[in-house]
Amino acid sequence: MGPREIHRRDRVKIATKLPSWMVQAEADVERLLDEQLKKLDTDHIDFYLLHALNEEWWSNLKRAGALKILERAQADGRIRHFGFSFHDSLRVFKEIIDSYDWEFCQIQYNFLDEGFQAGAEGLEYAATRQVGVIAMEPLRGGTLAVPQPAKIQQIWARAARQRPPADWALRWVWNHPAMITALSGMNAESQLAENLAAADLAETDGFSAEELDLFQEVRNYYASRMVVPCTTCGYCSPCPKGVAIPITFSAYNTGSMFDTWKSAAWSYDTFTVKAGHGADQCTQCGACEPQCPQGIPIIEKLKEAHRALAQAL
């Protein structure tokens, strides 16, 4: 780096993630971190995350001594802060939080996903242990930012103060005192300007009781469009054949709720089916159904979900 680039580096914070699924031994952590530093053309990473932790990958990282390596990298200056991003059940989230003195974590969080994965309870749990929480998917993959269905527009139109859809969603995340910040994907400069304007006016506990009631009406409308009454509680898991039951139902519901079948199908195929955890692996053993508090006929709904998502590809 030249002098000008070094000056700019001091003004920029870089975050990246360790690909957890690629780690089997201690040497993998060192190799991957050094490769990332080289590709980024920097001598340090400001925020480093163990990526997409679930129960399996967390176990692998512990066996590989990943935390010891990251502590060493932090001591020698290669990374400044480290935490993790998360995609699994609330139970696993609490186990990971309790296992180490983390600085921060990243969870999926928006006003429709209070009960998904770590969810609202996980957010509070992390906060009580003084772990900073960052929200990913505050706009739920953009579905809470695009022009909303007519029914949703009618609900928001009753608010005393009018806001764009993205503004409502982002402010809801920032409204929570335990949330540090939100990561919003942006595809255009206009979206950047809109999100910055919302951030400038963000505050905690800033919604009126009437506005919070509107959020609940919006949730109720989207809930009415769900095709499986799954709350992603995870009681059906683990499946003996590894079927990711809550994730499959979440993709199915997302396609129906937002009429985003192609993106829901792509996500399901890419991250679930190709990883060997799709509903096509179900052997109809029936172990899951007695565990479901909602009484969902899981076997039939898995067939239905897989068929609908496969047709949407």
Image (cartoon, helix red, strand yellow):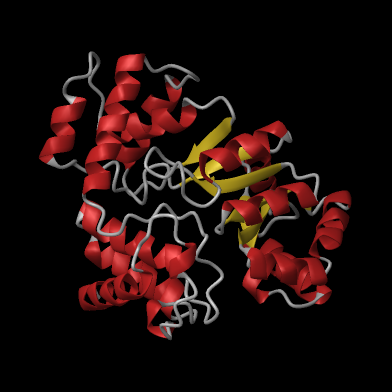
In the figure, 277 relative to 139: above or below?
Answer: below
Residue 297, percent from left and from top = 33, 68
Q: Which residue lies furthest to the left in this view?
A: 150
Residue 34 visible to the viewer: no
> How many marks do you count on the picture?
0
Residue at image position (59%, 55%) is 86
Residue 50, percent from left and from top = 67, 59
Of residues 139 and 32, the one nearer the viewer is 139
In the figure, 62 relative to 145: above or below?
Answer: below
Residue 141, percent from left and from top = 36, 51
Q: Looking at the rendering, in which quadrant would you find the C terminus?
A: bottom left
* 233 left or right, relative to 280: right
* 110 left or right, relative to 45: left
Residue at image position (65%, 38%) is 125
Q: Looking at the rendering, in which quadrant would you find the N terminus?
A: bottom right
Residue 267, percent from left and from top = 37, 67
Quadrant in the picture for residue 169:
top left
* 281 left or right, relative to 6: left
Quadrant in the picture for residue 296:
bottom left
Residue at image position (42%, 40%) is 110
Residue at image position (19%, 56%) is 259
